[in-house]
Image (tube, rainbow, N blue to C red):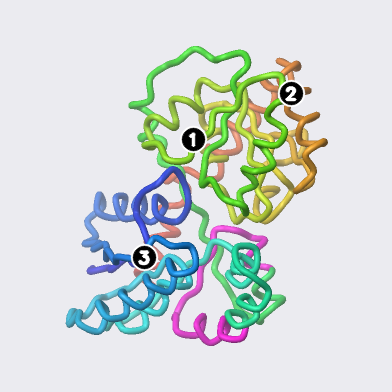
Amino acid sequence: MNILFISPTYSGAGGIGPHAFRVAEKLREIGYNVELMHVPHIPIKNLKNLSFSLFGTIKGISNKKTYDVVHAWNLPSAFIMKRIKSKKKILSVHGVYSKQVEMLHSKITSGIVSSQESQILDWADVLTTDSKAVQSEYKKKLGKDFEYLPAPLDKTKFEKIPNVERNPKQIAYVGRDSFEKGTDILRKIESKINGTVKFCTDLPWDETMKILKASQMLVVPSRTESIPQVIKEAFYLKVPVIATNVGGNPELVVHQETGILVPPEDPEKLTIAINNLLDNEESRRNFADNAFEFINKNFSWDVLLEKYTNLYES
């Protein structure tokens, strides 16, 4: 089976790029032929997605191949997907796109996107999302049916992460340094935290995981989210998690069971939660044990591989 993946990137500490790359790797391992389309873009905030879609569409029109499946990994990728010849088109989203645009740009821009969102989604034969919250919101907003397709955690990748000693005062942040991720909030309270925050925003995955493994906790201060892969990674490394109660975070972080949830954009409550957890070794251990069991039971390739192969084969 010949499959084409379309994503703005296939690298980074988190997000859709590494997810798409990991799925491609796994599919190749079991005999699928997966091609990654690489598309240039203009690295300026307001031009990034537009230039990616434009350059990709040109590349798509010139691509004369016919694929069994074309899988677009975000909404801008759908413009390229539409131009590629294939027997089946799949579009995956990792958040409600019009809401993400409003957060990053403006309500006016979001309104323009929202008016076209339903039509763009109709270009796909199958719609998927890794978040039950996103699945529910799109059903309510546009009446669209999305298949729930969780992002697996490849446990074998952690074999190369060395054993490290936990730093008693180290806190990790992993992800983009951006407004929607709430890094400004974390920096605002940094001086009030009884520890040191390590910001892993642009490091190789191996190095990022080494820092995370050495930390007392992971903090996810996002204003909006889908399902952060780094929470799953922290769970597997037995690193406790404090996250904001937004998007798909509560699907992973069950308050006072697999971690701690705090309200978004509440610096005071976030500070208190971090400092309290730093002072409570028993809570950290209990959260870590519960989260480790949860991630192995629900998000390993052993559990999810058949769901992915069925997506492409059916």
Residue 13: percent from the left, percent from the top? 44, 43
Of badges 3 and 1, nearer the viewer stands: 3
Residue denoted by label 3: 42
Please, what secondary structure does the residue beneath circle 2 have?
helix
Labels 3 & 1 near each other (Cβ < 8 A): no
Q: Which mark is residue 277?
A: 2
Q: Mark 2 and mark 1: span between their CA atoms?
A: 21 Å
- Image quadrant containing the C terminus: bottom left
Q: In terms of image quadrants, where is residue 225?
A: bottom right
Residue 95 horizontal/vertical position (percent) = 59, 63
CA separation in Å, label 2 and label 3: 42 Å
Say which residue appears at 68% left-offset and 74% top-offset.
107
Give the percent coordinates (x, y) of residue 6: 34, 67
**Magenta stretch contains residue 189:** no
Q: Nearer the viewer, mark 2 or mark 3?
A: 3
Residue appearing at x 60%, y 56% in the figure: 226
Disc 2 + disc 1, Cβ < 8 Å: no
N-term-proximal mark, 2 vs 3 = 3
* Highlighted range, magenta: 115-136
The answer to which of 185 and 299 lies nearer the viewer is: 185
**Residue type beneath disc 3:** Ile
Q: Residues within 10 Å of mark 3 (few under 14, many from 20)?
A: few
Residue 77 located left or right of residue 289? left
Question: Given the image, on which type of amino acid does mark 2 rest?
Answer: Leu
